Amino acid sequence: MIAKIATIFIPIVIIAWITASMLVPQVTNPRLRPTLLAKTVTLTDENYEVGYPLTLRKSERIDVEASGDGQPIDFRITDNQSSTLIEERGKTFYDLPWTAPAEGNFTFYVSASVGDITATLIVTEG
């Protein structure tokens, strides 16, 4: 009888231990998405727009966050021919998932219509 209970109980304990040893590290230390670009700039009357280049592969998925620190900013993405692919205006925060349409260089711009605004741009792998 004890042997029968042990043959059922021991595999359950082993499976639970293996599962816990694999899941606990992932729950306590989740894997962060790699940051491709992280910039903070103060936009002034003389320097009201700043662009940051980034090379992406075709179909590469990214997540773009842009913040005006509570102040409205504009945001846009252009390709290497300076064609505008995305343009957003007048928000204090943007969180945009985006997929690169082709391989190449893209420029991520933040701008403001008034000076002395701190803008932050963060691009992570999506």
Image (spheres, helix red, strand yellow):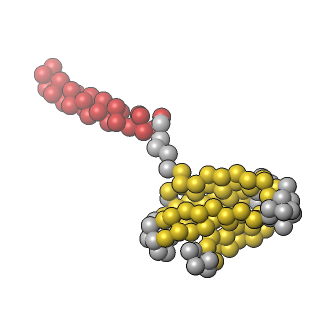
Q: Quadrant of residue 53?
A: bottom right
**Which of these two is toward me, 69 or 103?**
103
Name the residue at 56% across, 69% down. Answer: 106
Name the residue at 61% across, 73% down. Answer: 78
- Quadrant of image for the N terminus: top left
Asked whether the viewer can see residue 45, the reply is yes
Q: Is 8 left or right of 93, judged from the image as shown?
A: left
Name the residue at 83% across, 59% down. Answer: 44
Image label count = 0
Residue 97 in the image: x percent, y percent?
56, 64
Eyeballing the image, is 34 above or below 62?
A: above
Asked whether the viewer can see residue 95, the reply is no
Residue 81 in the image: x percent, y percent?
58, 79
Q: Is 118 left or right of 24, judged from the image as shown?
A: right
Name the residue at 84% across, 67% down. Answer: 113
Eyeballing the image, is 1 above or below 83?
A: above
Residue 116 in the image: x percent, y percent?
85, 55
Eyeballing the image, is 12 above or below 103?
A: above
Residue 66 in the image: x percent, y percent?
68, 58
